[in-house]
């Protein structure tokens, strides 16, 4: 992610969207 953000130009925009209720590490994982 950091590499992608540093490759953007000065006049570029990046939108990152996500669902805060989703998690890879929930209590029922595994």
Image (tube, helix red, strand yellow):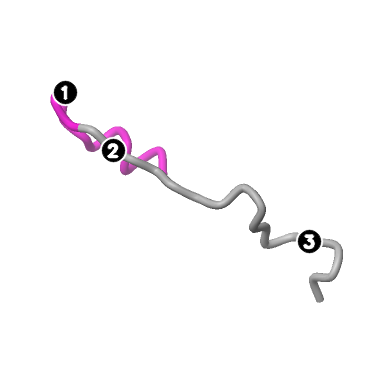
Mark 2, Cα crowd under 10 Å, few <14 / some 14-19 / many 20+, is few
Q: CA distance from mark 3 to mark 2?
A: 28 Å
Q: Residue furthest right?
A: 27
Residue 7, compared with residue 26, is above or below; it is: above
Residue 22 numbered mark, or none: none
Instruction: Decide which of tag 3 and tag 2 comes sooner along the chain.
Output: 2
The quarter holding residue 24 reads: bottom right
Q: Quadrant of the N terminus?
A: top left
Residue 20 in the figure: left or right of residue 10: right
Residue at image x 33%, y 40%?
Answer: 15
User: Does the magenta-highlighted stretch encompass residue 28?
Assistant: no
Q: Nearer the viewer, mark 3 or mark 1?
A: 3
Residue 2, compared with residue 21, is above or below; it is: above
Residue at image x 23%, y 37%?
Answer: 7
Residue 14 numbered mark, or none: 2
Instruction: Pinpoint residue 28: horizontal percent, then vertical percent.
Output: 84, 70
Which residue bears the numbered disc 1? 10
Instruction: Decide which of tag 3 and tag 1 comes sooner along the chain.
Output: 1
Instruction: Pinpoint residue 11: horizontal percent, then vertical percent.
Output: 13, 25
Q: Secondary structure at mark 1?
A: loop
Q: Quadrant of the C terminus?
A: bottom right
Q: Secondary structure at mark 2?
A: loop
Residue at image x 78%, y 61%?
Answer: 26
Residue in front for this viewpoint, 30 or 3:
30
Residue at image x 64%, y 58%?
Answer: 22
Q: CA distance from mark 1 to mark 2?
A: 11 Å
Residue 26 numbered mark, or none: 3
Mark 1, Cα crowd under 10 Å, few <14 / some 14-19 / many 20+, is few
Residue 26 in the figure: left or right of residue 13: right
Which span of residues is magenta-colored? 1-12
Instruction: Pinpoint residue 19: horizontal percent, then vertical percent.
Output: 56, 52
Determine whether label 3 and label 2 are within 8 Å by CB.
no
């Amino acid at each position: 992610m950091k590499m992608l953000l540093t490759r953007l130009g000065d006049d570029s925009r990046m939108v990152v969207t996500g669902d805060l209720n989703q998690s890879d590490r929930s209590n029922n994982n595994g």
